[in-house]
């Protein structure tokens, strides 16, 4: 990975040792951000997905795994960089670049989407985010700038109603995949009320026994309270997200038996 730190430690990295990870192409775009681009070569179907990272930053084997899965299904995928963190410094919780304002989050989310569209020529794209990245995906939606944004999926996203919704001619549909034991989403009801106020289409699926980070198998190694992996919830959440993107025309799934 060219000297980049892509996991908390060796045990964390070993969780993904058996995953089929494609090799990304690292690209620089606005504000000194460095994204990881997957599946952009030979992408004739003009479908794309931008992935937004957790507080651990963009250099993350978990996101490389998810990007590889989507690229294998014919999408151009950009793992966005909200921090300007090319080397994985954000794995250190004390790294000062981890602090983001709402306006910075929105600006960098829009910059990532613009780069994906302009660099790969995708005609329609989706946004997916995990934890902090869930907020970024929603900020992209709220920015109201891209009529090509077809779908948004948030996994244990840190959601709130703190930032304004800007006008847009068309709005993507939102899927929120939430753990009922997640202590980091105190404003979920306020978020839903804001979405209703603006007529946004939002589906919320709550997993009763799931904690924060429930989609990431490496969270089994997280000693902090409120974090854990839930295999059942993770599998169902990914299937729901794939169906959500398929409905929006981003993925083409095999027919059900």
Image (spheres, rainbow, N blue to C red):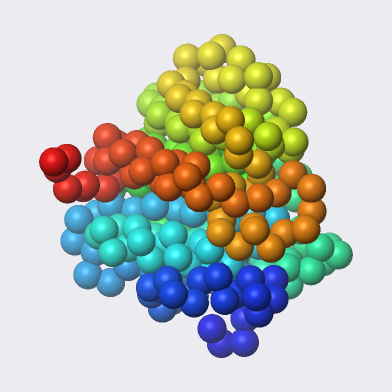
What residue do we see at 74% from left, 28% from top?
186
In the foreground, 139 or 174: 174
From the top left corner, tell me how far across and down residue 89 is, in percent: 73, 72
What residue do we see at 27% from left, 35% from top?
247
From the top left corner, tell me how far across and down residue 130 is, in percent: 57, 48
Above or below: residue 88 compared with residue 194: below
In the foreground, 197 or 238: 238
The quarter of the rendered structure image containing the C terminus is: top left
Q: In this view, does 193 lie to the left or right of 168?
A: right
Q: In this view, does 25 lie to the left or right of 101?
A: left
- Where, by quadrant of the figure, is residue 84 drawn? bottom right
The quarter of the rendered structure image containing the N terminus is: bottom right
What residue do we see at 50% from left, 50% from top?
231
From the top left corner, tell me how far across and down residue 197 is, in percent: 56, 12
Asked if residue 41 can be seen in this view, the reply is yes
Q: Which residue lies furthest to the top in this view?
A: 197
From the top left corner, tell me how far across and down residue 159 is, in percent: 65, 33
Above or below: residue 216 compared with residue 180: below
What residue do we see at 54% from left, 42% from top?
155
- Where, by quadrant of the figure, is residue 30 drawn? bottom right
């Amino acid at each position: 990975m060219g000297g980049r730190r892509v996991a908390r430690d060796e045990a964390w990295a070993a969780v993904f040792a058996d995953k089929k990870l494609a090799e990304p192409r690292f690209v620089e775009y606005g504000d000194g951000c460095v994204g990881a681009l997957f599946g952009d070569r030979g992408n004739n179907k003009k479908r794309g997905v931008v992935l937004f990272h957790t507080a651990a930053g963009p250099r993350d084997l978990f996101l490389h795994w998810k990007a590889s899965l989507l690229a294998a299904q014919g999408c151009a995928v950009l793992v966005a960089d909200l921090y300007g963190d090319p080397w994985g410094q954000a794995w250190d919780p004390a790294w000062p670049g981890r602090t983001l304002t709402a306006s910075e989050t929105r600006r960098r989310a829009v910059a990532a989407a613009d780069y994906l569209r302009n660099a790969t020529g995708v005609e329609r794209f989706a946004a997916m985010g995990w934890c902090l990245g869930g907020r970024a995906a929603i900020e992209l939606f709220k920015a109201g700038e891209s009529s090509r944004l077809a779908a948004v999926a948030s996994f244990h996203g840190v959601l709130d109603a703190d930032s304004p919704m800007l006008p847009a001619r068309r709005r993507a549909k939102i899927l929120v995949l939430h753990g009922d034991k997640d202590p980091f989403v105190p404003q979920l009801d306020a978020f839903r009320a804001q979405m209703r106020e603006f007529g946004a289409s939002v589906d919320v699926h709550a997993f009763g026994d799931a904690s924060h980070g429930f989609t990431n198998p490496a969270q089994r190694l997280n000693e902090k309270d409120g974090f854990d992996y839930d295999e059942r919830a993770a599998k169902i959440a990914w299937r729901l997200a794939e169906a959500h993107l398929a409905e929006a025309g981003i993925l083409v799934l095999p027919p059900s038996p």
